[in-house]
Amino acid sequence: MDPRLATLAHTLSLNTRLLQNCLAGVDDTLALRRLTADTNSMTFLVAHLIDARHFLADLLGVPLPNPLAAIVEYGKSQDDIGELPPVADLLAMWQRIGAHLDAALPSITSERLDVESGPRFPIADRTLLGSVAFLVQHDSYHLGQLSLLRRALGLPAMSYK
């Protein structure tokens, strides 16, 4: 694997585990709770992350059918979507896309990483590597939100174990 991609791949693998830790002890009712009318639920954030990881797989040229494509469209808010799957189903989807990316990332060549990426993210690096870096940061950002929601909903802090 290109050494520039290795740390990002390790972070994605870590985030796969950490999301599971964020949802430890969370049932469907708690996962759907919103702290305020303007705050997303844990369920919505997990669905958004699954969708974003499918976007990353597409961007890398290793697509995997997105089971949430009909429910969550990029840019939609929680108020604009229908019913989301239960936590157990979301976790299975998360594991599936996480394992898919873990298997696919080592095959991405250095040359491919240096090609200009189509999407425009709010970073200076316009290459595929820059897009991957942004999407890994996006993953981590929302995991922080999930961790904070977990505490705000009265659960213990997320574990790194």
Image (cartoon, helix red, strand yellow):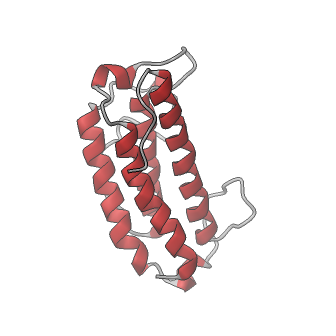
Report if residue 148 is visible in the image.
yes
Q: Count the marks: how many?
A: 0
Q: Residue furthest right?
A: 124
Near-viewer residue (161 or 57): 161
Identify which residue is drawn at 35% across, 21% down: 30
Above-or-below relation of 159 to 28: below
Residue 51 relative to residue 27: left or right:
right
* Position of residue 31 measured from the top left corner of the image (x, y, whole percent): 36, 26
Above-or-below relation of 15 to 31: below
Q: Residue furthest top?
A: 37
* Position of residue 99 measured from the top left corner of the image (x, y, whole percent): 31, 62
Near-viewer residue (154 or 8): 154
Near-viewer residue (134 or 7): 7
Q: Quadrant of residue 38?
A: top right
Near-viewer residue (109 or 80): 109
Residue 112 relative to residue 47: left or right:
right
Identify which residue is drawn at 42% across, 27% down: 81
Residue 124 relative to residue 47: left or right:
right
Above-or-below relation of 93 to 85: below
Report if residue 59 is visible in the image.
no
Identify which residue is drawn at 47% across, 19% down: 34
* Position of residue 150 measured from the top left corner of the image (x, y, whole percent): 45, 29
Q: Quadrant of residue 54?
A: bottom left
Identify which residue is drawn at 46% across, 78% down: 108
* Position of residue 86 measured from the top left corner of the image (x, y, whole percent): 26, 31
Above-or-below relation of 123 to 6: above
